[in-house]
Image: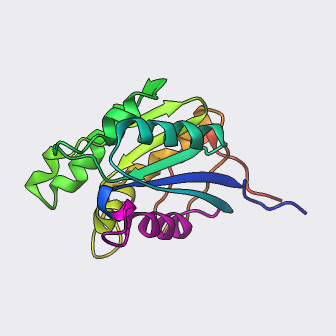
């Protein structure tokens, strides 16, 4: 008997000169895995990369993950204004389509916490049948931007970006992602909802 949920392959990329050379322990990949495992009902296979802040290397990793069948690729790190921050440039270099709404919403969420959120340059793109998202570098910020802001009673105040990810992946021909509503309720138009299994 097959699983009720589509299997999905997700690429996760942590971009950091220091973590990739062992100067400190990378916290980006564990944070991405923890949140995605908590949020998705689908069986997930992760493809992980820990790489330095080199534009060509980042672009090559993104292309390789898309070619390996990752429907979703998330990066963390390298999105600020510092000279070595080149993740957005590397991401845009492999894009077939830009999806500017994701970056706009991430900055809106982060601005609720810190005024320096306007310095972040996260972007999102489509390549083939994959969505590539640049996320912030800090584990707390990763969860906030994916999940959004909730009141103390659990009511959604500002939607996180992940609410729109499953439908975006539907539209580019990827697997049907299903979320745990208490973590992040995916939004789809009624016409795009899959009937529950009998």
Left or right position of 173 against 35: right
Q: Residue at x 52, y 65 (%)?
A: 39
Horizontal and vertical percent for residue 135?
Answer: 35, 51
Q: Residue furthest top?
A: 96
Horizontal and vertical percent for residue 66?
Answer: 59, 39
Say which of 113 and 150 sits in front: 113
26 in magenta: yes
Q: Residue at x 28, y 76 (%)?
A: 152
The answer to whether residue 31 is above or below residue 172 is: below
Horizontal and vertical percent for residue 49?
Answer: 50, 55
Q: Is residue 28 visible?
A: yes
Left or right position of 55 against 95: left
Q: Residue at x 37, y 35 (%)?
A: 90
Q: Quadrant of the N terminus?
A: bottom right
Q: Which residues are magenta?
A: 19-42
Write down the quadrant of residue 122 in the picture: top left
């Amino acid at each position: 008997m097959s699983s009720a949920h589509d299997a999905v392959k997700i690429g996760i990329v942590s971009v950091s000169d220091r973590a990739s050379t062992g100067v400190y322990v990378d916290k980006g990949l564990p944070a991405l895995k923890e949140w995605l495992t908590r949020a998705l009902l689908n069986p997930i296979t992760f493809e992980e990369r820990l790489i330095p802040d080199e534009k060509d290397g980042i672009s090559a990793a993104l292309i390789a993950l898309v070619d390996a069948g990752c429907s979703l690729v998330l990066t963390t790190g390298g999105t600020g204004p510092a000279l070595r921050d080149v993740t957005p440039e590397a991401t845009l270099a492999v894009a077939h389509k830009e999806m500017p709404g994701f970056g706009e919403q991430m900055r809106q969420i982060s601005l609720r916490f810190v005024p320096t959120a306007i310095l972040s340059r996260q972007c999102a793109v489509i390549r083939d049948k994959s969505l590539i998202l640049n996320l912030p570098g800090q584990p707390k910020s990763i969860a906030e931007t994916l999940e959004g802001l909730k009141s103390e009673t659990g009511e959604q105040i500002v939607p996180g970006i992940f609410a729109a990810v499953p439908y975006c992946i539907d539209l580019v021909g990827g697997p049907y992602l299903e979320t745990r509503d208490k973590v992040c309720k995916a939004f789809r138009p009624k016409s795009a909802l899959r009937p529950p299994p009998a």
